[in-house]
């Protein structure tokens, strides 16, 4: 091991890096690709590269690190702040998701009149979908999306049959535009706008100029989850002269459902004109048992997958493919989410669950922001909601209070009276609220709670003992199949042991 000393203004840190980690972290190449197995220190290296880029030299432009989901962003931010101090992430330096970067990009293009709305709005209110918007309907069969016309004006267009990413939920162009003109768009439509920008040479040049003026270096985690828009974004970074670091492992690519093209990464980094320098981190420091170490090696080389059966009471975390599955793996398991927030009832349930996960694990629900948005809560409003709704409901459940029609009616009435709901819940909303509260009630009676996460949320994390559940376990993992890669990620999160859990009816 090599002891590296890195000087930050007023503070001296000592860290331990092996030879390859040191080379990957401290090299001065313009474009760097780091191929890393689980537990090999790729996050450590990414954190080092961020800090070095941040503090070396006198370039006033920012350093940008991008991860693929909110959980990964939070983890990377925490690691950077622990290593370099909170000032390391002061403006213009930042860690964010690609969706957040896209939002800033579109905002820049609107603000500088490279693209335009039919209104004066320039701020984007990006949402999971349009479900809580006036005029949304579940039974609409037509689909619309946002696009750009020849003059770079944002418009709504009707999708061809079976085309597009998803149904917008509006029955007409006008109905959708009545919402969109105020800056409200879905993530799918944000990606549609990026598609349009990517295919326009003039706008691409504007994006390159924006990146050149704002940033000097970019670090991208999980390179094998990149899609065509992300590769285009990286090309803009390259043309802008940014230092580029991309980190990844082909076995941990989980986003093909979001159009990821992992097979293009090798082609991208081997393009001679880009002059990427590759570093392979192939030694893992995560695993504290020979069984776990051997499992990782075997799985990558076509070995048989074998897991012992276990129970949720004996693990530190539970992982599965879907949020819904996690609720059936033991009453001591508290999943961080019920799933997507799609209305008032699910928003209320999300905030109740969020308080529980914060109390016990210090973890925020991944759908917390969506719930706050659906209920239109300001910071002060959120505080009032927690005092008026969350605290009394959880106290009621903690002492074994019934989840009955009276409780549901009381929650609904309190929300309406306090202005948290604009209208009464329908039958489906009340049924959902009751079902979710019963699930919470079962867990509030336990003293041995453990968090439940989807595999996507667990990427980059590690625990001593991990329990997993999958509907079907193949004998041998195939790297070309995303389901198999998801299993690989799940069984490589533990330091000591991984067990297979049973689903409880």
Image: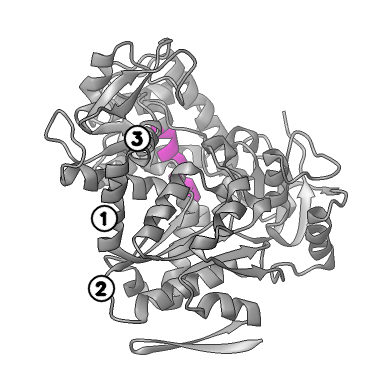
Quarter of the N terminus within the rendering: bottom right
Is 7 drawn above or below residue 297 in the view shown?
A: below
Q: Earlier in the sequence, mark 1 or mark 3?
A: 3
SS at circle 1: helix
Secondary structure that dominates the magenta span: helix
Tell us which disc is closer to us: 3 or 2: 3
Horizontal side of 87 relative to 368 (left or right) equals left
SS at circle 3: helix
Residue 388 position in % (x across, y down): 30, 39
Is residue 349 located in the magenta-colored stretch of the structure? yes
Image disc number at residue 219: none
Camera sees residue 262:
no
Q: Residue furthest left?
A: 120
Residue 320 position in % (x across, y down): 66, 41
Q: CA distance from mark 1 to mark 2?
A: 15 Å
Horizontal side of 19 relative to 185 (left or right) equals right
**Front in this rendered view, residue 479 or 236:** 236
Q: CA distance from mark 1 to mark 3?
A: 17 Å
Tell us which disc is closer to us: 1 or 2: 1
Residue ID for mark 1: 210
Residue ID for mark 3: 196
Q: CA distance from mark 3 to mark 2?
A: 31 Å
**Front in this rendered view, residue 334 or 80:** 80
Q: Earlier in the sequence, mark 3 or mark 2?
A: 2
Residue ID for mark 2: 60
Quarter of the C terminus within the rendering: top right
SS at circle 2: loop
Q: Which residues are magenta?
A: 347-357
| Quarter of image, res 77 | bottom left
Is residue 396 located in the magenta-colored stretch of the structure? no
């Amino acid at each position: 091991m090599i002891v590296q000393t890195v000087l930050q203004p007023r503070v001296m840190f000592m860290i331990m890096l092996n030879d390859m980690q040191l080379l990957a972290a401290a090299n001065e190449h313009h474009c760097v690709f780091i191929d890393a197995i689980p537990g090999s220190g790729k996050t450590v290296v990414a954190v080092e590269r961020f800090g070095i880029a941040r503090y070396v030299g006198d370039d006033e432009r920012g350093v940008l690190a991008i991860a693929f989901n909110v959980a990964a962003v939070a983890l990377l931010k925490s690691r950077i702040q622990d290593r370099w101090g909170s000032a390391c992430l002061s403006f213009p330096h930042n860690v964010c998701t690609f969706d957040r970067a896209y939002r800033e990009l579109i905002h820049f293009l609107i603000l500088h009149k490279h693209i335009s709305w039919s209104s004066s709005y320039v701020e984007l209110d990006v949402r999971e979908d349009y479900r809580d918007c006036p005029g949304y309907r579940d039974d609409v069969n037509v689909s619309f999306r946002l696009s750009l016309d020849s003059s770079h004006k944002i418009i709504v267009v009707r999708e061809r049959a079976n085309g597009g990413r998803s149904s917008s939920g509006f029955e007409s162009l006008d109905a959708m535009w009545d919402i969109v003109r105020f800056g409200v768009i879905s993530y799918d439509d944000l990606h549609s706008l990026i598609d349009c920008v990517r295919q326009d040479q003039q706008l691409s040049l504007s994006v390159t100029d924006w990146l050149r003026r704002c940033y000097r270096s970019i670090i991208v985690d999980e390179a094998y989850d990149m899609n065509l828009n992300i590769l285009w974004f990286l090309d803009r970074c390259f043309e802008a002269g940014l230092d580029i670091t991309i980190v990844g492992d082909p076995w941990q690519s989980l986003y093909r459902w979001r159009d990821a093209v992992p097979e293009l990464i090798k082609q991208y980094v081997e393009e001679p004109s880009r002059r990427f320098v590759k570093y392979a981190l192939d030694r893992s420091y995560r695993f504290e048992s020979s069984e776990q170490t051997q499992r990782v090696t075997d799985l990558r080389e076509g070995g048989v997958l074998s897991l012992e059966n276990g129970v949720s009471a004996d693990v530190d975390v539970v992982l599965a493919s879907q949020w819904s599955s996690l609720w059936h793996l033991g009453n001591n398991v508290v999943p961080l989410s019920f799933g997507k927030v799609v209305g008032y009832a699910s928003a209320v349930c999300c905030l109740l669950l969020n308080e529980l996960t914060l109390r016990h694990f210090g973890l925020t629900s991944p759908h917390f922001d969506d719930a706050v948005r659906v209920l239109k809560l300001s910071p002060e409003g959120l505080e009032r909601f927690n005092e008026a709704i969350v605290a009394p409901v959880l106290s009621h459940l903690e002492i074994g209070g019934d989840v009955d029609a009276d409780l549901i009616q009381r929650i609904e009435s309190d929300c309406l009276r306090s202005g948290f709901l604009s209208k009464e819940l329908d039958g489906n909303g009340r049924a959902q609220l009751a079902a979710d509260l019963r699930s919470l009630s079962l867990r509030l009676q336990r003293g041995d709670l453990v968090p439940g996460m989807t595999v996507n949320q667990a990427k980059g994390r590690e625990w001593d003992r991990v329990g997993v559940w999958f509907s079907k376990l193949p004998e041998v993992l195939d790297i070309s199949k995303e389901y198999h890669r998801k299993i690989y990620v799940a069984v490589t999160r533990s330091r000591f042991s991984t067990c297979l859990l049973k689903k409880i009816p």
